[in-house]
């Protein structure tokens, strides 16, 4: 199975792989560690020529300045975490299909991998390139380290802890996956982007505050619909300067949106002053009592509603 997945059986030790790539062993070890893999013993043959080529590519990127000393650890670590999660899910799916076949699990999984792996690899490359194309205009328009004024919104499930206790592991996973899929669909349909899902919450951003507000309202309305299995949610939305980094967003505006979610009542969207300024005139805004939350002693929240509601 390992040979099928790696392309060939491992035949090189750590030192041999580093020497073949032309990099110091310390650098090769550090890259391996940042990817999230345990360090093999010095005499263990754990590497293949593909590892050598990958290290050579990394060396070339460092030389070209794409992987600077500051960026190297963060980017490689992000790659490792992202692909580790993806690999766990893909192997679990592979095993699930293999168990339904009549033969030995390992034999069936290996046969499946031989057929499926090239297709999955091609699809991952396609999806990656599509996201590159989508991100190009957005990212290249902002100088490195500069922030962008955007809308950021947290949406979380009301009563998640109580509900999760009543579900089996399989039911909980299915429930969360359905929540994430439905929420992502609504966000994307409104021209916004999901940054990450956090189990019982979704964080998304939008270049247009109105689009973000519409997505947040659509999600709370969906949760309030008794005929819709989507769980009841609440949302916190803020508009201000964000700093995008490695697929995530940072800055005080993100923190404010998170704090506003704790203030929101079930089925409501609560916004900050920046969002209130951006959305004034098109929505009903109700000034709420100033509140003290972690990091903000007198945060001014506003309840956002459609006019007439």
Image: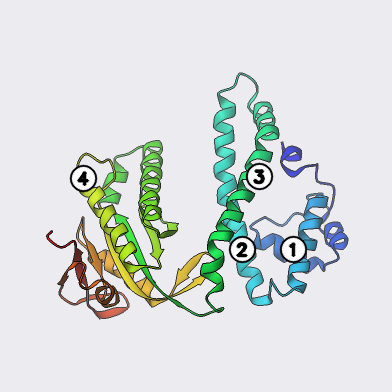
Q: CA distance from mark 3 to mark 2?
A: 23 Å
Q: Nearer the viewer, mark 1 or mark 4?
A: 4
> Helix, strand or loop at disc 1?
helix
> SS for tag 2?
helix
Q: Which residue is mark 4?
A: 225
The CA span between labels 1 and 4 is 53 Å
**Residue at image location 37% in from the left, 43% down from the top:** 178
Local crowd size for mark 3, using a 10 Å CA cut-off: few (<14), some (14–19), many (≥20): few
Residue drawn 83% across and 51% down?
Answer: 49
Q: Nearer the N terminus, badge 3 or badge 1?
A: 1
Label 4 neighbourhood size at 10 Å, few (<14), some (14-19), many (20+)?
few
Sequence order check: which comes first, mark 3 or mark 4? 3
Where does label 3 land, which residue?
A: 122
Mark toward the start of the polypeptide (2 vs 4): 2
Residue lying at 71% horizontally and 64% vertically, measured from the top left: 31
What's the CA distance linking mark 1 and mark 2?
13 Å
Q: Nearer the viewer, mark 3 or mark 1?
A: 3
Can you name the residue that lies furthest to the left here?
Answer: 308
Give the class, few, some or many, for how many residues have Cα within 10 Å of label 2's Cα (few <14, many ≥20): some
Whole-percent x, y for residue 29 in the image: 74, 63
Looking at the rendered structure, the secondary structure element under dot 3 is helix
Residue to which mark 1 is pinned: 29
Disc number at residue 77?
2
């Amino acid at each position: 199975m390992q040979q099928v997945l790696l392309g060939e059986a491992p035949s090189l030790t750590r030192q041999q792989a580093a020497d073949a790539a032309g990099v110091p062993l310390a650098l090769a070890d550090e890259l391996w560690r940042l990817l999230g893999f345990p360090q093999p013993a010095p005499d263990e043959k754990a590497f293949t020529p593909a590892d050598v080529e990958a290290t050579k590519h990394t060396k070339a990127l460092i030389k070209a300045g794409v992987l600077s000393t500051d960026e190297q650890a963060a980017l490689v670590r992000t790659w490792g975490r992202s692909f580790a999660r993806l690999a766990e899910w893909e192997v679990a799916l592979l095993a699930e299909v293999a168990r339904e076949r009549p033969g030995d699990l390992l034999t069936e999984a290996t046969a499946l991998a031989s057929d499926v792996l090239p297709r999955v690899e091609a699809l991952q490359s396609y999806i990656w390139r599509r996201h590159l194309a989508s991100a190009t205009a957005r990212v290249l328009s902002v100088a490195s380290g500069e922030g962008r004024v955007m809308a950021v919104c947290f949406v979380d499930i009301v009563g998640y802890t109580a509900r999760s206790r009543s579900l089996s592991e399989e039911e909980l996973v299915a429930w969360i996956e359905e929540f994430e899929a439905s929420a992502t669909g609504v966000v994307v349909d409104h021209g916004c982007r999901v940054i990450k899902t956090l189990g019982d919450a979704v964080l998304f951003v939008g270049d247009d505050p109105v689009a973000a507000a519409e997505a947040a309202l659509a999600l709370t309305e969906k949760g309030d619909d008794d005929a819709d299995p989507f769980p009841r949610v609440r949302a916190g939305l803020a508009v201000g300067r964000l700093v995008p980094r490695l697929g995530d967003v940072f800055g005080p505006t993100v923190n404010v949106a998170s704090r506003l979610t704790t203030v929101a009542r079930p089925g409501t969207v609560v916004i900050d002053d920046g969002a209130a300024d951006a959305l004034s005139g098109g929505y009903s805004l109700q000034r709420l009592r100033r509140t003290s939350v972690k990091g903000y002693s007198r945060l001014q929240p506003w309840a956002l509603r459609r006019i007439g509601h």
